[in-house]
Every structure is written in structure tokens, then in C-alpha cells.
Amino acid sequence: MTDKIHYRRDGDIAVLRIANPPVNALSQEVRTGLAEGMNRAEADTGVRAVLIVGDGRAFIAGADIREFGKPPQEPHLPDLCNRIEASPLIVVASLHGVSLGGGLEVALSAHYRIAQPTARVGLPEVHLGLIPGAGGTQRLPRICGAKDAIGVITSGRHLGARDALALGIIDEITENDPEEAGLSYTRTLLAEAAARRPVSELPAPEPLDWDAVYEEVLKKGRGQISPAAAVRAVQASSELPFVDGLAEERRIFNDLMQTDQRKGMIHAFFAERQVSNLPELKDTPARQVEQIGVVGGGTMGAGIATAALLAGLRVALLEMTQQAAQAAGERIAGNLAGALKRGKITAEQQSRMLSENLICDTRDAALSDADLVIEAVFEDMDVKREVFGRLDAVCKPGAILATNTSYLDVNEIAAATARPSDVIGLHFFSPAHVMKLLEVVVADKTAGDVTATAFALGKRLGKTAVRSGVCDGFIGNRLLNACRSAADHMVLDGASPFQIDSALQDFGFAMGPFAVSDLAGLDIAWAMRKRRAAGRDPRERVGRYADKLCEAGHFGQKTGEGFYLYEKGRRGGTPDPRVIDLIKAERVERGITPRSFSDAEIQRRYMAAMVNEGAKVLGEGIAGRPLDVDMVQIFGYGFPRYRGGPMKWADMTGLPEVLADIDRFAQEDAYFWSAAPLLRELVAQGRTFDDLNRDA
Ligand code: 3H9
């Protein structure tokens, strides 16, 4: 027996306790230990039943993801599950914490399952670009039917104990300690002379219109293939004998294991956990934060206040007039009503948040007790500096002063105070109570414990916090501006904004860049273009068609007209043909003969611009690790998770190929397409961005 599985006898029951912290992943040692434990129990005279339980905070969180991509080692999990199910003894699994993926598959190979009320189960393999590969697609439909099994497997969602009971996945919910409850349940089974109950022997599930279900799931996956592949595996459970269905599941699982989507999603899984884990902050304690101040109650300020309230913090919001303060309060109340509707909070929590935890005021003194204040006022340096001067005067010593600026120089803002070491950037994304990304912008003088506090706050707010240095646009908007320019150049040269949006949606982006501009408001980028015009290099190509739209008052969704036309009550917009006329006129004016672009070329150019800027941001030290850039794009900019982020995408595409693209494009526009020195360096050394992640 390996030391990951503890064996003990309790009368005629053998207990196998899995002890592989932190989450009992099914590593090779655990699989070996479980197989040996089953052998030992069967050889142990007098044993009539086996109880499998998990030590620590979970039953089993699934296969050990770190083993994926390496040569598989025996015993294989599907064989282990079959071996458990085939045991002549009664096998019971007692679940607590999570039982996910292979963890639930082990449980499904037991003959009976019970769970604590707080237990959660699920088959989340699709989120790793895979399908369940140890019988989950064959056993679950035999328990709950094909339709529900497809719902569980293609969404990868976690089910609470009640839902699991309703679907027949577990037999009983028990309050007691998992081992105690399991022993008592098993004793009852033995006393009642209950029979073994192998799920594989249950009748095959009902047939569905498989092609229709497959197409529907494929469409919903927006380019992600594993959920649709799972439908085919469940189809096999309905149409083939159990062993053949299992073989079909294995074939699909192994095929998916070789895909870039699997590699991208597993990269994202680990990067998501690593991104907020900064080695330099390991021993730096965070400051205590219980009360947050927010300056400005517009969409952003109200969103930040909502996020803080939802995390159980007290909030003081400052506005200029009584009327604005009241409007901010109403915005926050509206956000919380949405959270109530989605079941995120109870009515009681909602009313407590509004009546006890929130004040909206017009006096600076309202911020005097705040541990951390976030400024979310108009994006103008003079305005920000004035606000920070006032904050410096009113906030208590040790309070952290944060700016939500998305472009401006945080060093300059910090210099407006006598405590620059307490100043930091906290760049939220709108709507701030929904979007997961938080860029933590560390300025030259920001103290280590201020950065540590920002990361601790990010965690408390449920955000994915990413460290960025100071530059125009930080990590996210720097990359966005670079690819927006690439898109703009393609428009000038012959592509339409609508073709570009559609090609990039096909690539997997949640929205194309022109639809995003309409959503954000075209006036924002217009103001930025005007701000930058004075210092612009004459070699920079900038389209004027978007300025023309703004001059006509077309600011996107908020005015009903932008690149697209929006009708009230209808989701999304339809292309505005007048945009094409504007672009045509500009091409004539500039003497450009338009050419056609394939969707593949659009994707290639857009991605080359993004990767190149990502490499520049890394080379300049604005981002510390390639995975930081990947996480910013996935959590803040709708980048398809199944591609792992732009830097991972570049690794998988091949850095020499990406560099060759850039050098080729540079023949037309050497100014824009200047390759990042870091990218050249990596190509010359035959290294990848992932190598840099490993070095960090
Ligand atoms: C599968 O089962 C395939 C089978 O169908 C077929 C096989 C043939 N492996 O997230 P946390 C680590 S696919 C290895 O911070 P939480 C994680 O990296 C698998 N490591 O905590 C972290 O390490 P570190 C299907 C794992 O409480 C630490 O545990 N299962 C695994 O917020 C703590 O994790 C899944 O997809 C793993 N399976 O959330 C479940 N899981 O401390 C994936 C976790 O060094 N896991 N770690 O950073 C999760 O969803 C969450 O981690 C979980 C805990 C809910 C379990």
C-alpha cells in the first residue's frame, strides 16, 4: 500500500482513507494505493464491505492534472474504476467537499454513495479541454438519463448535494463526519443484506436526437470542441454495450488530450492559480481592510462599491452633489437587486448591505475612517491630482489611496500626495461587480505591503488580480490599442469592421473589437486619440473614419448608433452601412486601393499585433510573466480561454512563425510592425514564453 491510502478495519468493513493533500488528486500513488487497498480488503478474512473516504477538505478533486501530457502510468484510472465496481464486496463512497472529474468517477464505480449536505460533485473535464475519461460519460447517463447527464457534463458545473440526490447521483445526504456516516450507512446496508449495485449493469439511457444535441452544444461552445465531443461519448452510452461505450469514451478522451485546446485550458487552470501568487510578496503581510472609500458614483464607482459590499465590506461613497450621491446609491441598489435575482445574495443580506454597510455622502470627511479608498472619477490628470490632494488631507495615516485610472501615470497621481508609498492603481473592468479582472498597478514608490493588500483585496472581491507596472494603458489596454491599430489598418486597406468582428468571433473572442468599442463608447477612444495627437509620430497610421462617427454624435450603444445600429429592446446591433461609406471615402482620400482579406489573415494579423505588444510589455518589465498577460486577456478582454491566452497561443503556433508574420507585415509598415526584442531573443534561443513562466 502507498502511504497515500490508509487502511483500517472496522468490524466487517474495510475503510480506505485517501490522504493526498491538498485535494486528494488521483496521482499514480493514489491509484496504486486504492487498487492495493481493494485487493487487501478482498483478501482480508471477514471483510464484507469497503468504505472509501477522503481525508482533509475533499473526497477527490479528480485526476492529477499535473500528470497530463506526460506518459500515462499504471494503474490507469478507468481500469481502477472497473476494478472497484467489479469487487464482490459492497463498496460505499462517502463524499464531502468536492468530488470532481475522476473523483466522481471513482464514486460512481462504488455501489452506493452518500454525501454531506455541503458536498459538491461534478464532471468539469470540459473546462480542461477534455471529457470525463474514467467511465463518467457511460455511468452517469445510466443513473440520471442521457439528457441530464449531457447537461452536467457539457456545462462542467458543480452540483450541490440536493441536486445530486435529485438526480440519483447520491443515495442519501448525511450530516455526520464522512467516515462515521459512511460506516453507519454501510452497516445498515450489510444488516439489510443489500446487494452489490454496479452502475454499468443498469439499462442503457434513452436515445436523443444526437446530431441536433451535438450541433446545439457545438454552437454554444463558441469554438470549444470538448463539450460537443462529450455528447458523442454519451451517445455511445446509449447505443453501445458498456465496455464498447467505455472504449469510445477513451478514444475521444485520448484524441482531446493531444489538442491545443487541452493544452491551452490546462495552462489557464494553473496560470489562474499562479497569477496572484507573487513570490516577492510571500512574506509581506497585508494591511487590514474592512472599510472601503469610493470616490465617484458613476457606473464604475457604483460597480466597485457593489463588489465591495458583496464581499462583506463597509463602503463610504463620495459624490459632488446630493443628487449625484443619491443617484449612486440607486445604481448600487440596482446592482444588488440583480445579485439578489441571480441568487447570489438573500433579501436580508441585500437590505443589510444597503442600510448598514453603505453611505453615500458629499463630505470628504466621510472617507476619514476608510482603510482603502478607490478613486473612480473622470479620466483627467488634473482632476485626479486634485482628488488625491484632498484624499491625502482627509484619509487616516496608513490608509491606501488607489486610482482606478485605465491609462494615466500612477506615479504622477501619487506625487500629488505626501504619501506616494501608499498609492497604487486598482484598475477594475466594467461592470466592476461582474468582471473578474483587476489590474494592480504598482507605481515606483508603492510599498510592498500596499501591493500585498491590493492582492488580498482582489481575492476577497473574488477577482483575478494581475500585477502591472506603470505605462500608458498598463498591460490590458496596451495590448488592446496595438490590436485595435492592426484592425484599423486592415479596415483602411480593404477589410470591413464587420468582417473583422466576425473573423475574431470565429477565433473565439466573446466580441469583435468594433462591437466592443460600441459597447465601451466611441467617445472614449476618440478622446484618447485627441490626447495623443500632439505627440504622435508622423509614421503612425490612424484611421479618421471613427472620428467622423463621433463628430456625428454616434458614440455606440449609448446613442443607438456606432459601427452598428442598435434598436431598443434588441440584443446586439446590425452593421451600419454608412460606416462603409465613410471608410470608402477615406480610402479615396488617402489614395488606397482596397484589397481583400481572408478571415485567417485577419486573425493572424490581429494576434501577431497582440503577441508582439505582449512581448514588449514583458520586455519592459510592465508584466512580470507571460502568464500575467494571458490572464489579463482571458479575464478582462474576452480572449478565448481554450486558447490559453495570447502568449500561450503564440507558443503553440510557434514563435518563429509569429515572428516571420511580423517581419513580413513590416515590409508594408515598418513603424507599426517593429518586432519586440524579447520575441526575437526567444526565437534566436529556441525558447518559448512558457520557458519564461517556468523561470519566474
Ligand atoms: C479528470 O479527472 C479526468 C478524468 O475524468 C479521467 C482521467 C483518466 N490535480 O483551486 P485551489 C491543486 S480531470 C492537481 O487553489 P480551491 C491546485 O493547483 C480533473 N492539482 O483551491 C492548487 O495547487 P497550489 C477534473 C490540483 O479550494 C491546490 O490544489 N477535476 C487539482 O479554490 C488548491 O486548489 C478538476 O478539474 C487536480 N485535479 O479549489 C478539478 N485540483 O496550492 C480542478 C486542484 O499549488 N480543481 N489542484 O496552487 C478545482 O476545481 C479546484 O482546485 C478545487 C479546489 C475546487 C478542487
Image (cartoon, rainbow, N blue to C red):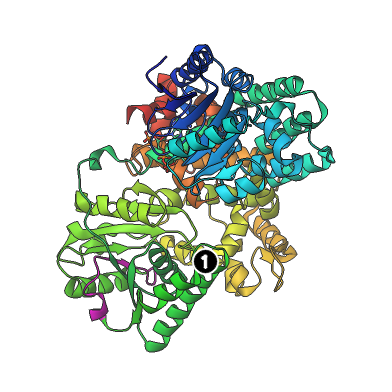
| Residue drawn 49% across the image and 57% down it | 435
Which residue position holds label 1? 339
| Residue 268 in view, yes or no | no
Q: In this orientation, which residue lies closer to the viewer: 136 or 696?
A: 136
In the displayed structure image, the side of residue 95 where residue 192 appears, left or right: right
Element marked by disc 1: helix
Estimate the x, y position of residue 586 in percent, counting from the top left: 65, 59
User: Which residue is painted at 53% across and 68% down in the image?
Assistant: 340
- Mark 1 CB within 8 Å of ligand 1: no
Residue 223 is situated, as x and y percent measured from the top left of the image, at 67, 40
**Amino acid at the residue labelled 1:** Ala
Instruction: Tell me the quarter of the picture where residue 281 sits.
Output: top left
Magenta residues, as a range?
364-379
**Residue positioned most to the bottom:** 322
Image quarter for residue 229?
top right
Side of 677 where 100 appears, left or right = right
Residue farthest to the front, as pictured: 191
Q: Is residue 447 left or right of residue 480?
A: left
